[in-house]
Image (cartoon, rainbow, N blue to C red):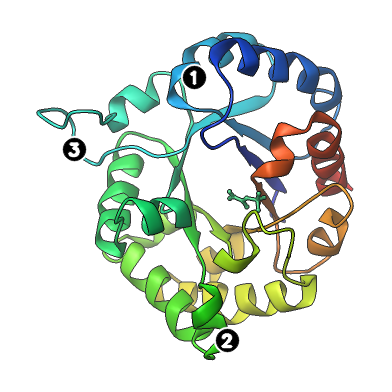
């Protein structure tokens, strides 16, 4: 049995005051939902504030990125240990980092290893672009990202990951994949390669999420798929009613 997992990626939205307001709206709806690992990923500037607000709740906190180095002259960056001060999770390899900030599979690999080394749970994002999808390269791209991003990990390391299949063409577009197609990609191009990277038992326990225009209205379509264990939610995580609906759907 894999515990369902839903994370909200707020991206570059919300000041500290705005973040505080959103959490206050989310808490009453999220707190009573049992049986789902719930995670909020606000911007770095709000992490400490939100960490205080979540104390005593079963809602986890995650960062949206981090550097892989321990410390040093890396202006503007945040280290794994700094993230660990208030977070249990960190998103790694989001397609926006790959597309706008030149993040490569090699960077993803360094970050995953660094996150695991300090005890963070990495939420590792993979997914193909529209062009790659339309030219029939989904398998090649996703399997490559999984293999390169997780290269050199032990089976025990792999078991500690959460992986998000996020087709780039579905992110923020309102054009979600179908549950069936997402399930098929997760089964064939993520879970099956995990058998080779780790082993069958580990491939069976790793939570794999779908991300890309998930809403309160379509969440059940994804959560009813056997290989999909939850969602990484962008836009809808900023809308309390929608996000609570998604988390509630994951519990069901
Ligand atoms: C995301 O940012 O990871 C995401 C899935 O965004 P959205 O839900 O807005 O498509």
Residue 59 x/y as whole percent: 67, 26
Q: Spatial distance from mark 3 to mark 1, Cα to Cα? A: 20 Å
204 relative to 125 in the view: left or right: right
Q: Earlier in the sequence, mark 2 or mark 1?
A: 1
Q: CA distance from mark 2 to mark 3?
A: 37 Å
Mark 3 burial class by Cα count in 10 Å: few <14, some 14-19, many 20+: some
Confirm or deny contact between disc 2 and disc 1 (CB under 8 A). Answer: no
Please provide percent x and percent y for residue 52.
57, 8
Furthest residue in direction bottom, as rendered = 136
For mark 2, what is the residue?
134
Q: Nearer the viewer, residue 220 or 252?
A: 220
Residue at 78% x, 77% y: name it.
180
First in sequence, mark 3 or 1: give its number.
Answer: 1
Mark number, residue 234: none
Q: Nearer the viewer, mark 2 or mark 3?
A: 2
- Name above or below for residue 86 compared with residue 183: above
Above or below residue 146? Residue 28 is: above
Q: Which residue is mark 3?
A: 69
C-alpha distance separating marks 2 and 1: 38 Å
Q: Dot 2 surroundings within 10 Å: few (below 14), some, or many (20 or more)?
A: few
Q: Nearer the viewer, residue 226 or 104?
A: 104
Q: Secondary structure at mark 1?
A: helix
Q: Secondary structure at mark 2?
A: helix
What count of labels does the image hold? 3
Residue denoted by label 1:
47
Q: Which of labels 2 and 1 is toward the front?
A: 2
């Amino acid at each position: 049995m894999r515990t369902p997992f839903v994370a909200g990626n707020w991206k570059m939205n919300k000041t500290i005051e705005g973040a505080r307001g959103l959490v206050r709206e989310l808490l009453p709806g999220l707190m009573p939902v049992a049986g789902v690992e719930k995670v909020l990923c606000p911007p770095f500037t709000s992490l400490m504030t939100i960490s205080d607000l979540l104390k005593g709740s079963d809602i986890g906190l995650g960062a949206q990125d981090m550097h892989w180095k321990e410390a040093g002259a890396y202006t503007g960056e945040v280290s794994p240990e700094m993230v660990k001060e208030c977070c249990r999770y960190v998103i790694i390899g989001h397609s926006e980092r790959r597309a706008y900030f030149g993040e490569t599979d090699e960077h993803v690999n360094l970050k995953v290893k660094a996150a695991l080394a300090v005890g963070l749970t990495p939420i590792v994002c993979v997914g193909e672009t529209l062009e790659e999808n339309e030219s029939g390269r989904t398998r090649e791209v996703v399997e490559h990202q999984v293999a390169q991003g997780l290269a050199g990990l032990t089976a025990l390391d792999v078991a500690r990951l959460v992986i998000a299949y996020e087709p780039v063409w579905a992110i923020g577009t309102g054009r979600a994949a179908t549950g069936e197609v997402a399930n098929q990609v997760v089964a064939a191009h993520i879970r099956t390669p995990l058998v080779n990277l780790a082993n069958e038992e580990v491939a069976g326990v790793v939570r794999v999420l779908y991300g890309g225009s998930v809403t309160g209205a379509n969440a059940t379509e994804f959560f009813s798929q056997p290989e999909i264990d939850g969602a990484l939610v962008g836009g809808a995580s900023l809308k309390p009613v929608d996000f609570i609906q998604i988390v509630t759907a994951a519990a069901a």
